[in-house]
Image (cartoon, rainbow, N blue to C red):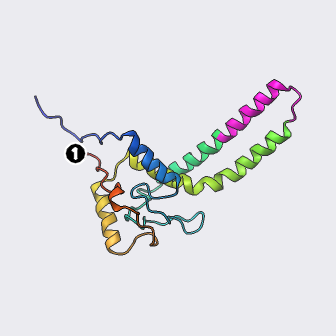
Amino acid sequence: TEAPSGPTPAPARDARTWARLLGRGALKHCPNCGAGRLYRGWFRMVERCPGCGLRFEREPGFFVGAYLVNFAVTVVLLFVLSMGFVAMKAVDADADPRVPLLAGLVVAVVVPPFFYPYSRTIWSAIDILMSPLEPEEVADAAAALARGEGGGGGGAPADPSRATGNVRPRGGD
């Protein structure tokens, strides 16, 4: 039998890896190493992780996925609110729609800017899970740290051995 040719598929991710990386993203931490302090202000994310040197924008247009995550969270909340109103109308056909409409307006206006930084780090986690770091990205991150180009300092992971910078690159063993 011949050995299969072409790239080897990325290694399967177990549920703990998914939970760890998504949990880091949900806390606005680097999904790769867990370092914090990724934002200067609410909306301005640093270019690289201060703990591992990971460049967050892995390719042009990378954060379009973050907008999708943000939009999805808002739509799910609006859907739940709408279903609550439907249930309310089922119990009382004369229920006033003003309160649910006002609540929907508040959700539609407040949730997207509030959730924006979380959506960026969650998207970074999803992307790393779906497309593990390439060897060039790992080398670039290490070189950036050596040059002192981490994203703002003070955000090193508490336990460097827990960093997933050792995430196997695509096509790796």
Residue at image x 64%, y 45%? 74
- Which residue is labeled 1 in the image? 173
Side (left or right) of 96 relative to 108:
right
List the single residue furthest toward the bottom.
Answer: 148
Q: Between residue 102 and residue 164, name the one nearer to us.
A: 164
The part of the image, by quadrant, that contains residue 11 is top left
Q: Quadrant of the N terminus?
A: top left
Residue at image x 31%, y 73%? 146
Residue 40 horizontal/vertical position (percent): 55, 69
Q: Secondary structure at mark 1?
A: loop
List the single residue furthest toward the right.
Answer: 94
Residue 94 shown in magenta: yes
The part of the image, by quadrant, that contains residue 158 is bottom left
Residue at image x 28%, y 62%? 139
Q: Main secondary structure of the magenta part?
A: helix
Residue 25 horizontal/vertical position (percent): 49, 53
| Callout count | 1
Residue 78 shown in magenta: yes
List the single residue furthest toward the left.
Answer: 1
Q: Which residues are magenta?
A: 77-96
Q: Please tell me whether residue 45 is drawn above or below residue 11 in the rendered image.
A: below
Q: Callout 1 environment at 10 Å: few (<14), some (14 to 19), or many (20+)?
A: few
Side (left or right) of 80 relative to 18:
right
Q: Please tell me whether residue 121 is drawn above or below residue 101 in the rendered image.
A: below
Badge 1 amino acid = Asp
Q: Between residue 141 and residue 6, name the one nearer to us.
A: 141
Residue at image x 45%, y 67%? 155
Side (left or right) of 29 relative to 145:
right
Q: Quadrant of the C terminus?
A: top left
